[in-house]
Image (cartoon, grey):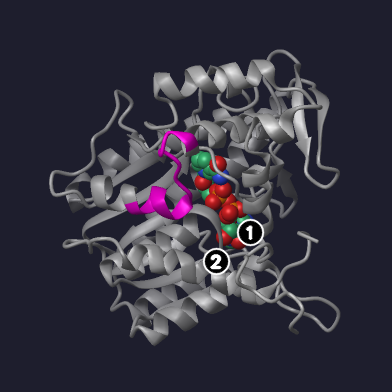
Amino acid sequence: MALNCFPLGCKEAVQRQVDYISSQPKLNNGPKRVLVLGASSGFGLASRIEAAFGAGADTLGVSFERGPSEHRPGSAGWYNNLYFREIAEAHGLYAKNLVGDAFSPSMREQVLNTIRSDFGGKVDLVVYSLATGVRPDQDNGNLIRSAIKPVGAPYTGLTLNIEKEQLEAITLEPASLQEIDSTIKVMGGEDWADWIELLNHHEMLADGFKTVAYSYVGPESTQAIYHKGTLGHAKKDLQYHAEMMHEWLKPLGGDAWVAVCKALVTKASVFIPGLSPYVMALFKVTKEMGLHEGCIEQMCRLFATQLYAPAGPTLDSERMIRMDDWELRDDVQLQVNQLLAEMTPENFKELVDYQGLRQDFMQLNGFDFGNIDYEQK
Ligand code: NAI
């Protein structure tokens, strides 16, 4: 069912996020012209909603989504784009969606043209929130594929099979050097920096320009599969490019940051093998402690207390913004580790927040909203 999508549920998901941001204090010095790469779901969509409804920004969103056909509806992100624009325009905000491959020269051209014609030639903020498993090789057009694998040693653990609603044992073999390299190419910082360089080349970076991309670090219990695995290598590359851009943007009064976010259920994260048991345990603990955040709450806090805080962001020793501060609290992790030690394929539905993860997963595609009549066409 969740491979399909229910458009009115997607509208509800966007509207709920808009309502949340509308209920929060406005950003006084927020961005006015914002480009979001990866705007149709997860953190990118939440960033866009925060920029538009928290700061009154005009937004240009780029995403890779499927439109409807005769036989099936479009992808959820397709409808998220459509309804975001509808709701933004109803509030007098400019919103344009460009759907296609963000890695391609033709998409770059479309973005440049739109910034020229609709943004007066400048952007204040670029959010880089792509999550993808492939990108075309610029040299020969072949597809480069990322691999989500551990590095150095095999990983054995449990993972959620959401279709079968079962917790299953998995073993992942360590990645080859080629696989590490490809993952860095697909999910690292090269494309982010290329975009910023392109915009700079066309003199499109406004005074005080900012750019942010999203990363994950996680606690020890997830590091074999994430931080020390292929994805972690790609995220280190993201930070490496942020460092280069930091120096390079200084003369323009601009800056580039990586924001380390918390683990959440998104279209991209739900299929990371081995991560779901941790996410279910984390949700259980943070919900009980009143510390749970979804994408929209994270992005609201990021913009208000970090990116557009009067004194600027607070950075860790590697110059990263830590939005995973609540997730990584000792008291949270202590309880999460206890739950992980107790979790089995027999008890997980009761022990941890399986229902919460499942509901988030269903809602990504517009299902499982209590106030929607799913019988209507
Ligand atoms: P998501 O799957 O919800 O969103 C990905 C976006 O990228 C979508 O808008 C999709 O259309 C777009 N996209 C993918 N390939 C594209 C292409 N070739 N051209 C144009 N658009 C393309 O993913 P999510 O989870 O919001 O991830 C965004 C970033 O946040 C990623 O860098 C991810 O690693 C990071 N992150 C995610 C966490 C999580 O728990 N979900 C935690 C911390 C960081």
Q: Is residue 256 left or right of residue 148?
A: left
Count of numbered marks: 2
Determine the residue positioned at 58% across, 42% down: 187
- Of the two numbered discs 1 and 2 on the same chain, state the one appearing first in sequence: 2
Residue 300, horizontal then vertical, whole percent: 34, 54
Q: Which residue is mark 2?
A: 13
Determine the residue positioned at 23% across, 41% down: 313
Find residue 221 and report its image quarter.
Answer: top right
Residue 316, horizontal then vertical, whole percent: 30, 27
Residue 331, horizontal then vertical, whole percent: 41, 20
Q: Is residue 325 left or right of residue 181?
A: left
Residue 171, horizontal then vertical, whole percent: 81, 22
Which range is magenta? 288-300
Mark 1 residue CB less than 8 A from any atom of ligand 1? yes
Determine the residue positioned at 51% across, 63% down: 39
Q: Is residue 171 left or right of residue 363?
A: right
Q: Which residue is mark 1?
A: 364
Q: Is residue 46 above or below residue 148?
A: below
The answer to whether marks 1 and 2 mark residues whose Cβ atoms lie closer than 8 Å is: yes
- Badge 2: residue crowd in 10 Å (few <14, some 14–19, many ≥20): many
How much space separates mark 1 and mark 2, taking CA atoms?
A: 8 Å
